[in-house]
Amino acid sequence: MNKRILVVEDDVAIGHLIKMTLNTQHYEYETVQDGQNALQRTISMKPDVIILDLGLPDMDGVEVIHKIRSWSQTPIIVVSARDEEYDKINALDAGADDYVTKPFSVDELLARIRVALRRNINERNIDQDQPVFVNGNLKIDYLANTVFVHGEEVHLTPIEYKLLVVLSKHVGKVLTHNFLLKEVWLNALQSDVPSLRVFMVTLRKKIEEDPANPKYIQTHIRVGYRMLRYGGDK
Ligand code: CA
C-alpha cells in the first residue's frame, strides 16, 4: 500500500511544492491548511508521516505537535522558516522527529520523508525493549553495557555510553541539545552544550571509522544530533 502523508501548510506556494514532490514518488497525501483540521485528519486518515508547517493561522504548530503526541507517535517533519530557530527546537522538544528549513530542496524533503517512514516501520516492528541494538558495524549490548565496533569491544566512559544509548533508542530522530543534556546528565544545568560537544568528539573517535565524516551520528548545527541507520538514507 502506498504511504500516506498528511501535509499541513497554509502557504499556497510551499503547499504546491510539497504536493509536486510527493507526486513524483507516488505517495498518497492529503493537505489541510490549519491546526484544527490537522488534528482531525490525523485521527481519521492515520497518516504514516505528517509534514507540519509551524506558522498556522489558527494554532501554534508546537501546540499541534503536543496534541498529536498525546495519543500518536506518527513521525512529524516540521517545516520552518530560517528565522524560526527557537520554534524549530521547541517543535523537536515537543516530539517532532525532524525538520526542513524553508527554502528546502525537493531531494532534501524526500530524504527526510524516507528517514521518517523507516523510523515509523522500526517503531512498529521492533521490540523497543530488546537487549541488543545493531546498526551497521555498531552493536550495543544494553544488558552488559558494552559496545562493539566490527566485533571489537570499545571502551566508553559512562557519559559517552549514556549519550550513545540515548541516540540509539531514538535512531532516526533529531534530538536537541537540551533533550540530550537532560537525558544524559538528568539535569541540564549540570552540563552545557560545549561539554556535550566534547563528549561527542571523543565518542565519535571511538565508534566512527572517519570521525570527520561521521556515518552514525549526524550533527545538526545549533539544534542537536541524530543517529542514522548506517548506510541508510541521509
Ligand atoms: Ca505558514
Image (cartoon, rainbow, N blue to C red):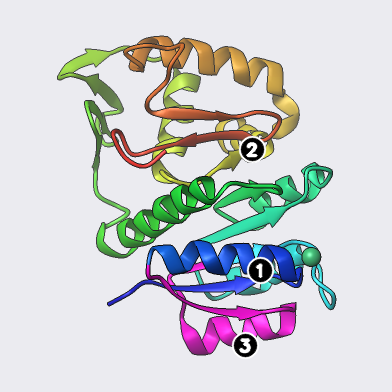
Q: Is residue 95 visible?
A: no
Amino acid of disc 3: Gln
Residue linked to disc 2: 182
Instruction: Examine the rendered structure and indicate whether residue 135 appears above or below residue 205.
Output: below
* Residues drawn in magenta: 26-50
Image quadrant containing the N terminus = bottom left
Residue linked to disc 1: 15
Q: Foreground: 4 or 61? A: 4
Where residue 233 appears, as percent x and y from the top left, is 37, 42
Amino acid of disc 1: Gly
Where residue 9 appears, as percent x and y from the top left, is 70, 70
Residue linked to disc 3: 40
Which element is circle 3 on?
helix
Q: Mark 2 and 1 residues: CB-CB less than 8 Å, in contact? A: no
Question: For residue 179, what is the image quadrant?
Answer: top right
Q: Is residue 36 magenta?
A: yes
Count the labels in the image: 3
First-in-chain label (1 vs 3)? 1
Q: Is mark 1 within 8 Å of ligand 1?
A: no
- Tell which tag, 1 or 3, sits nearer the viewer: 1
In three-dimensional space, the C-alpha distance between marks 3 and 2, rounded to whole angstroms, equals 33 Å
- Tell which tag, 2 or 1, sits nearer the viewer: 1
Which element is circle 1 on?
helix
Question: For residue 28, what is the image quadrant?
Answer: bottom left
Which element is circle 2 on?
helix
The residue sitting at 74% across, 71% down in the picture is: 12
Where residue 190 appears, as percent x and y from the top left, is 71, 25
